[in-house]
Amino acid sequence: MDTVNVKTLHSSVPSQALPELILQWDPWTTSRITTSIAAIILSEKMGFTVSLRSGTSGSSMYEELATGKLHLAFETWPLSNPVAHQKYARDFESWSEADETGQVRAYKYSNLFGRSGIFETAKYDAAPLLQDALKGQSGQAHFAQEAFDQPELGEWDGSPLCAGGNCSVQILHIAPQGFDEGQVEALVQTLGIPATVAYLGQTAHTDAIWSAVTKGTGMSTRKASTCAAQCSLL
């Protein structure tokens, strides 16, 4: 079960009986910046008492928004949580009062786009694609320089090429849930990449990428959350 931590910002202006607002507090920096700005405006300028709630996964967040346990979330990753998004959310442009209660109103960015995939943090020139680089011993050695023996949140070894413990390369990921769930694992299987996926947690993942970049050691990383011990996600 997710743990829940709540930080409360009390209004500095008369509330006039305004309701308390509960905002999703995600573990990554971009969401926290946006949420902090919103919390300051809502509490200091608009008079709401604002609580920041952490410990909710990406998929359960939609249900909590629909049931009123959460009121606002600023990074919802609908493509990472398609089942929950389809079940609970309606785009604001198509939402109406006639819609059933408990639906989440989703506001789309008009011109923002993102990219997900597996990327290396230290350049490897011998092969243009990760799956090709890992076919040879030199590529395996390049991307397996800093493996984690005991990743904080466990390790996925579902690639058929890893049967019998044959994979020395890790793709470093933040967590098995909440960040493009299952996407990296599916890429590993589809592309035939001989690598496991290690779930490090947010802080250890950030530190691992920084270490690989500054030292120039091989590492692949997924934009938004994955990486290997020389394969990691940014």
Image (cartoon, rainbow, N blue to C red):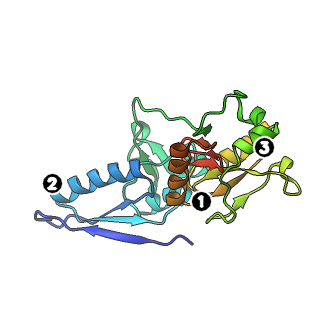
Q: Quadrant for residue 231, please give it.
A: top right
Q: Where is residue 36? Give x, y as percent.
A: 30, 55
Q: How many neighbours does mark 2 have within 10 angstroms: few (below 14), some (14-19), or many (20 or more)?
A: few
Q: Secondary structure at mark 2?
A: helix
Q: Where is residue 130? Give x, y as percent.
A: 71, 35
Q: Is residue 17 above or below residue 195?
A: below
Identify the amino acid type marked 1.
Leu
Q: In front of the other: label 2 or label 1?
A: 1
Q: Residue at x 50, y 48 (%)?
A: 210
Identify the amino acid type marked 3.
Gln
Q: Residue at x 42, y 32 (%)?
A: 112
Q: Which mark is residue 189?
A: 3
Quadrant location, the N terminus: bottom right
Q: What residue is shown with label 1?
A: 200
Q: Nearer the viewer, residue 13 or 25?
A: 25
Q: Nearer the viewer, residue 174 or 141?
A: 141
Q: Secondary structure at mark 3?
A: helix
Task: Check if mark 2's residue and mark 1's residue have beta carbons within 8 Å.
Answer: no
Spatial CA span between label 1 and label 3: 20 Å
Residue 34 falls left or right of residue 202: left
Q: Is residue 182 above or below residue 60?
A: above
Q: Secondary structure at mark 1?
A: loop
Q: What residue is shown with label 2?
A: 45
Spatial CA span between label 2 and label 1: 38 Å
Q: Where is residue 23? Give x, y as percent.
A: 36, 59
* Residue 180 visible in the picture: no
Q: Count the labels in the image.
A: 3
Residue 43 falls left or right of residue 105: left
Q: Where is residue 229? Give x, y as percent.
A: 66, 50
Nearer-N-terminus badge (2/3):
2
Q: Nearer the viewer, residue 23 or 211?
A: 211
